[in-house]
Amino acid sequence: MKDLGEVMLVLEDVRKYFPLPRRIFKRKGGYIKAVDGVTFSVHREDILGLVGESGSGKSTLGYTLVRIYRPTAGKISFLGKDIGKIDRGELKGFKKNMQIVFQDPGSSLNPRRTVEQTLELPLRVHNIDGGKERRRRIRELLSVVGLPGVYMQKYPSALSGGQKQRVAIARALATEPSFLVLDEPTSALDVSVQGKIISLLLALHDEFSLSYLFITHDLSLMRNVATSVAIMYLGKICEIAPTAKFFAEPLHPYTQMLLSSIPVVTDEEETLKPPKVTSTGEVPSPVNIPSGCSFHPRCAKEMDVCSKVDPEMVEVREGHAVRCHLYSEAEITALSSQGT
C-alpha cells in the first residue's frame, strides 16, 4: 500500500445551504441543503474521485472548497489553516495555492481576452514575474499543456473545445498551486478529446506532485485515475474508500447500484461488476429531501429504521467508511475480521 503523505485538505462536517425565496402569502421558503455534513481528507499527491448523479452537490462542494461559496457551517482546513475564517489578505495566498478547472471551458474563458491576456491575469494578480519574464512564463505554460506559442494571440473563438480546456488548465497552473479542483473537466468535450485531457492531467499530476479533487459522474473513469473514491448523494457522502477496495468490495446499496449500471463490452468485464442492483423511483428533489436515509425510497434493502433515522458514517476498516444502517457494530466487526 502507498504510504500516505502530508494531509493537504481536511473537511469536517461541511455544509452549504442556499435559502429559498419567500413567496407572498406563503411561509418562508426554507433551504436547499446542497452540501450537508461532508467529512473527508486528501493527502499530498492523492487523487480523490468525487462521484455522484446530477444534483448530488458535488460541484457545489468544489466551489465551496475554493471559496467561490462560503461554507454555511463546518470546517475546511487547507495546509493547516481554516479557510472559512481567513481574512481577505490571506485569501489571496490561499487561492494562489488552490485552483479550479471548470467543466465548460467555453464559458470559463473570457471571449474578449487573448490566450496571452488570459494567462497573464493570474500572474499579474499574484505579482508573479514581469515584463519579458512574464511572457516567457506564458509560453512555458502553453508548452506544458501541449500548445505552441503561436496560440498566445488567439481568442477563445478560434480554439477547439480541447484547446480551450488546455488553456484553462494552463491558467490554473499559472500560480504554481499544489491542489487542483477538477470540476468534470472532460464532460463538455468530444469523446475523442476526453482521453487526451485525462492523460494530460495525469502527466501534470506526476510532474508537479499535485493533489486533485476530481469531480465526475463517470464512475468507471475513476478506476484508472483516482487513488480513492467518494460517492455523494443529495449532499452527503455515502461511501469512501481506496480505489482498489472500493471497486472490489462496494458496501452501500447506492454504490452497488452505480457499479452494476456501468456499461461493459465483454463478458469478462461483466464478471468484475457486483450483482445487478435495481432501484425504484427518481432522485428526490434537494428542496424536499426524504427523512432518515435520503436513499431509502430507492433502496432495495430498505429497513424500518431507514425512513426514521439518518445513519452516521462509520469506518468499516481502515480508510473504508460507509453511511448505511446495514452496517451495525456486529456487521462491522465481522467485515473487519475478514479484512485482517
Image: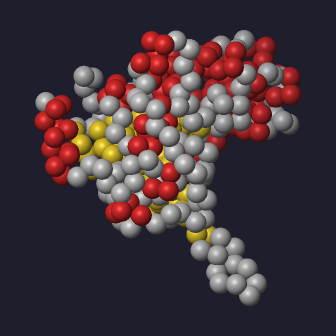
> Could you tell me which residue is drawn at 56 percent across and 24 percent down?
263
Q: Does the image show residue 111?
A: yes
On screen, residue 112 versus residue 212, left or right, reads: right
Q: Which of 293 and 214 is in front in this view?
A: 293
Q: Does the image show residue 75?
A: no
The image position of residue 232, as x and y in percent, is 48, 46
The image position of residue 46, as x and y in percent, is 39, 30
On screen, residue 68 versus residue 50, left or right, reads: right
On screen, residue 132 versus residue 244, left or right, reads: right
The part of the image, by quadrant, that contains residue 120 is top right
The part of the image, by quadrant, that contains residue 172 is top right
The image position of residue 289, as x and y in percent, is 53, 63
> Could you tell me which residue is drawn at 66 percent across and 36 percent down?
103
- The quarter of the picture where the C terminus appears is top left
- The quarter of the picture where the N terminus appears is top left
Picture colour scheme: secondary structure
Q: Is residue 123 above or below residue 281?
A: above
Q: Which residue lies furthest to the bottom in this view?
A: 25
On screen, residue 232 versus residue 283, left or right, reads: left
Q: How many numbered tags mark residues here?
A: 0
> Could you tell me which residue is drawn at 47 percent across and 16 percent down?
269
The image position of residue 326, as x and y in percent, is 30, 50
Q: Which of 17 and 219 is in front in this view?
A: 219
Q: Nearer the viewer, residue 117 or 309?
A: 309
> Could you tell me which residue is drawn at 53 percent across and 27 percent down?
262
